[in-house]
Amino acid sequence: MTRHVCFHGAESTGKSTLAPRLALRLGGLVVPEYGRTYAEANGTDLDEIDLLAIFDGHVAATREALAHNPEWLISDTDALMTQAWAIMLLGRRLPEIDLWADVADLYLVPAMDLPWQEDGTRLFGSDLARRQFMDVAIGELERRQLKWAWVEGDGDARLQSALAAIEAAGLG
């Protein structure tokens, strides 16, 4: 049975750096952040159609990875982050995402203890916007009563924090 861990939270907190490092350490597969790929190809002026396309991309990539029956699946965000984007960009939830139920076993939320870095796909760089986005993201986890944990530190300490959270959740 695959154990599924997903990174979740505000932009520029190290999710995309940490996901492959964690997968390598655990011997698992990574599902890259589909929203980044989509934004790089289509821009960041996202509407409902774009967000639903991102949702579909996340779901398809996760299904494809799960078809390989890995022991560990590490997602660099999932559809719940797309819902957070909908709330931030559109001011409302998307019902299609609310119906989605293939959630991870554990969500790891990297703290905003790393400096903001612009990469061409990020929109919420001010301290206020980052905090608001983080609050919305955590609200999605809490609304569904999902298991989640903070990840803190820099470099190897951040990886160790993720591994400790996985162990504490009983997945290790």
Image (tube, helix red, strand yellow):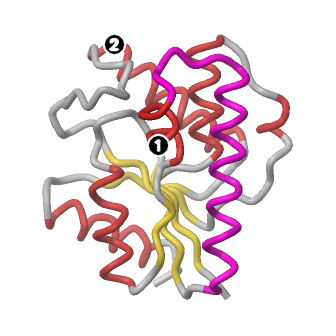
- Kindly identify which residue carries mark 2: 128
Secondary structure under the numbered disc 1 in the rendered image: helix
- Please report the residue visible at 30 percent of the width from the left and 26 percent of the height from the top: 120
Residues 25 and 147: in front is 25
- Please report the residue visible at 63 percent of the width from the left and 51 percent of the height from the top: 58
Q: Would you place residue 157 above or below residue 128 in this image?
A: below
Q: Position of residue 27 (x, y in %)?
A: 40, 86
Quadrant including the C terminus: bottom left
Q: How far apart are marks 1 and 2 (CA)?
A: 26 Å
Q: Position of residue 162 (x, y in %)?
A: 34, 66
Q: What residue type is labelled 2?
A: Leu
- Kindly identify which residue carries mark 1: 37
Q: Would you place residue 6 above or below residue 142 in this image?
A: below
Indicate left or right for 172 with 70 as reference.
left
Indicate left or right for 85 with 53 as reference.
left
Q: Which of marks 1 and 2 is nearer the N terminus?
A: 1
Question: Callout 1: 10 Å neighbours few (<14), some, many (20+)?
Answer: some
Q: Position of residue 94 (x, y in %)?
A: 77, 27
Disc number for residue 157:
none
Q: Which amino acid does label 1 sit on?
A: Thr
Q: Position of residue 130 (x, y in %)?
A: 35, 22
Q: Where are the magenta residues, as a range?
A: 42-69
Quadrant including the N terminus: bottom right
